[in-house]
Amino acid sequence: MVLQRRVLVSDFDGTMTRHDFYKLVTESLLPPGTPDYWAEYRAGTVTHFEALRRYFACIRASEAEVLVVVERMELDQRLPGAVAELRGAGWDVVVTSAGCDWYIRRLLGAAGVELEVHSNPGRFEAGKGLLMEMPTGSPFLSTTLGVNKTEVVRKLIAEGVEVAFAGDGFPDADPARLVPGELRFARGDLADVLKQEGLEFQPFAAWSDIARALIQRGS
Ligand SMILES: [Mg+2]
């Protein structure tokens, strides 16, 4: 008997971590007078990718100072154990993020966790900030988000994989709608969007709660 493959597709900022990198950047790393690019994104005048790219390019702090802010994102401390338990229960974990893999790979690496990550590439250059780029070589390219999370979920579903999705932001709404309500995990802006639409979802406080819920659900 071949077991059905199961994959938890997860957002990173605000989902695996307590705080969003871009929010911490806007609170503590931007020079005075930096435009409100997030408001421009919400108003529809710039894309999500472009808003984040501009913020990150405004950073004039040193790399060491930025890495202190990365630490303050607070990756769920129980994430490494939760990933191991999920794997033991037959669930793979795939990270999809419209943020930047520069800090994602650092935080996961520091926690000793190796995961498939689909995110926007970037590098830090003193005086130029965090230079985030489109993932041009990715099969999951979105002109507005960089990484197309919806396509990641859609492809897995098309392959017959049982897919759960977890997220907290506006870009998570499209992929979240593709999975069944009992496998749709949400908080923050994503939870608000799903509530407005009357769509079922499972709330969570920490990412490791999702792992527990999936494992307890059994087969
Ligand atoms: Mg998020």
Image (tube, grey):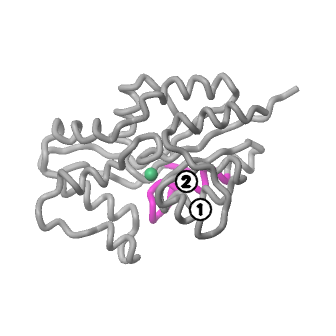
Is disc 1 in contact with disc 2, using a CB cutoff of under 8 Å?
yes
Question: For the C terminus, which image quadrant?
Answer: top right
Q: Which residue is mark 2?
A: 149
Compared across the picture, whether 56 is left or right of 195 comes to left
Q: CA distance from mark 1 to mark 2?
A: 8 Å
Which amino acid lies under the numbered mark 1 shown in the image of this protein?
Answer: Asp
Q: Is residue 142 magenta?
A: yes
Q: Residue at x 75, y 32 (%)?
A: 218
Compared across the picture, whether 65 is left or right of 96 comes to left
Instruction: Tell me the number on the disc at residue 174.
Output: 1
List x then y, in percent, for residue 133: 35, 53
N-terminal-most mark, 1 or 2: 2
Q: Is residue 170 magenta?
A: no
Closer to us: 190 or 29: 190
Compared across the picture, whether 185 is left or right of 48 comes to right
List x then y, in percent, for residue 132: 32, 52
Q: Is residue 165 above or below residue 70?
A: below
Q: What segment is highlighted magenta in the picture?
A: 138-154
Instruction: Bin the neighbour count of mark 2 within 10 Å (Cα to Cα): few under 14, some 14-19, many 20 and up.
Output: many
Closer to us: 174 or 189: 189
Compared across the picture, whether 133 is left or right of 78 comes to left
Instruction: Tell me the number on the disc at residue 133.
Output: none
- Labels 1, 2: front one: 1
Q: Residue at x 13, y 51 (%)?
A: 60
Q: Is residue 127 above or below residue 72?
A: below
Q: Residue at x 41, y 47 (%)?
A: 13
